[in-house]
Image (cartoon, rainbow, N blue to C red):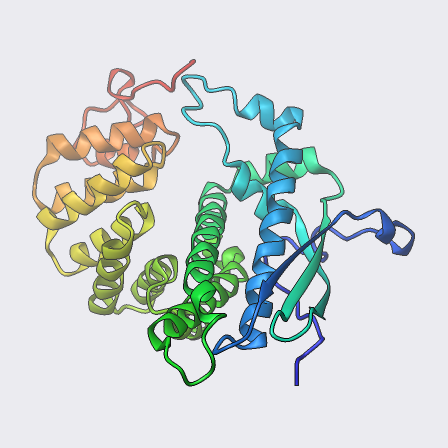
Amino acid sequence: MIRRAFRALPVCLLLACLFPGPGAGEEAKLKEYSAARFFGGPIRAETAEYAARVAASNLAVQEAMRLLAALPEVRFAGAVTPGNPKPPDVAGLACLLYEVRPVRTALLGYPPQLRMEARVALVPPEQPGRAVIDALTRPDTLDAASRLQARREALLDAYDRAAAPLLRTPPGMGGSAGLLEAERCVNALKSLDFFFTLLPQYGDFWPDPAAALEKLNACLALDPHNALALAARAEVMLKLDKPDAAMDDAQAALALDDTLDRAHDALGTALLVRRLPALAVNSFGKAAALCPRKPSYLLNRASAYLMLDEKEAMCRDLAAACGLGDCAGLTWAGKNGMCPKTSEGVAPDTVPQREGE
């Protein structure tokens, strides 16, 4: 039996509990988007339904991106300056700030041209400008949301390529490789949507690692190649004092996507725990290169240099981290006679000034 119920698709993170949706009188004002996917042959109706939901949601996210790009807060933040080396990620903002609300699904057409149509509504935040400013203070979450959306779009394209020839294939008449690929894409999409619900914990660096591990395992059961989930599980394993498992997950994540700065950082931390500081320096360096304005990566590399007894390199990283706003490491090193210091523990000529100061 074809299910008519439209289960909620977690396309955007901050749902009605954080940004309440419009009242009953405003529901009719919400703009709706629809998309359809054919099914038949070995392609099941349920598979086409999920792909249609994702396609409709992607259309809604594109509209949210257009609306956000017109906001003064986004235009101002997007002005590339020495202190702001790259504009905000509008795709990530769209996913974080807008809710994509399911409306209905419908079975359309006649055999053999049956298709599932999904319809969604785009719900804006109550105060878009303030929401943008808040979201920009959470760069890790913003980056993850953008990566998830880009991956969803790529997987939907892969699904369409795999499903198209199968629609002309009678059941039991071949096409098994294409069917496996189509089902893999849908499971990977489900895995991404599952991970999206974990972004608040991701942004807070997993305050409850045991509970997070259970959810990440479920996420990876849907798609073992979810690079963000693997990198996240590496961080959770570190919090659970399992550096070897963390190393395995971080390396697996980086094999899939070597631009994940948090995966490099997790790998470096695991290597440091295993007392392999030279390798850790390399991993932390890659993380810092990918995200040069994040002082924690420099502080971590400074720890690796300390283990190597390379004090000069350590002090350089501590000073650079201080220039980015975190002077705790340099102050500690100064008080312990490791780096040049003043009475407060930091030598003014050692600390680089922030651009614009």
The total of numbered circles placed on residues is: 0
Image coords of residue 29 (percent x, y): 84, 46
Identify the residue at image location x=76%, y=43%.
126
Where, quadrant-wise, is the N terminus in this rendering? bottom right
The residue located at (49%, 50%) in the rendering is 149
Q: Decide if residue 200 is on the left or right side of residue 223.
A: right
Q: Is residue 352 above or below residue 301?
A: above
- Residue depicted at 21% across the width and 51% down the height: 268
Q: Quadrant of residue 331?
A: top left
Residue 82 visible in image? yes
> Residue 324, relative to residue 34: is it above or below?
above
259 to 81, vertically: above or below: below
Q: Position of residue 250 (x, y in %)?
A: 26, 59
Residue located farthest toward the right when viewing the structure as drawn: 25
> Residue 83: x and y, percent?
43, 20
- Quadrant in the picture for the C terminus: top left
Residue 156 located left or right of residue 284: right
Tell me the residue at 61%/34% (across/down).
133
For the question of whether residue 13 can be seen, the reply is no
| Left or right, residue 83 beside residue 7 | left
Q: Quadrant of residue 348?
A: top left
Q: Is residue 202 left or right of residue 349?
A: right
Which is nearer the eye, 334 or 254? 254
> Measured along the vertical axis of the image, is residue 220 above or below residue 348?
below
Could you say which quadrant of the image residue 214 lies in? bottom left
Where is residue 241 shown, x and y percent of the image? 28, 68
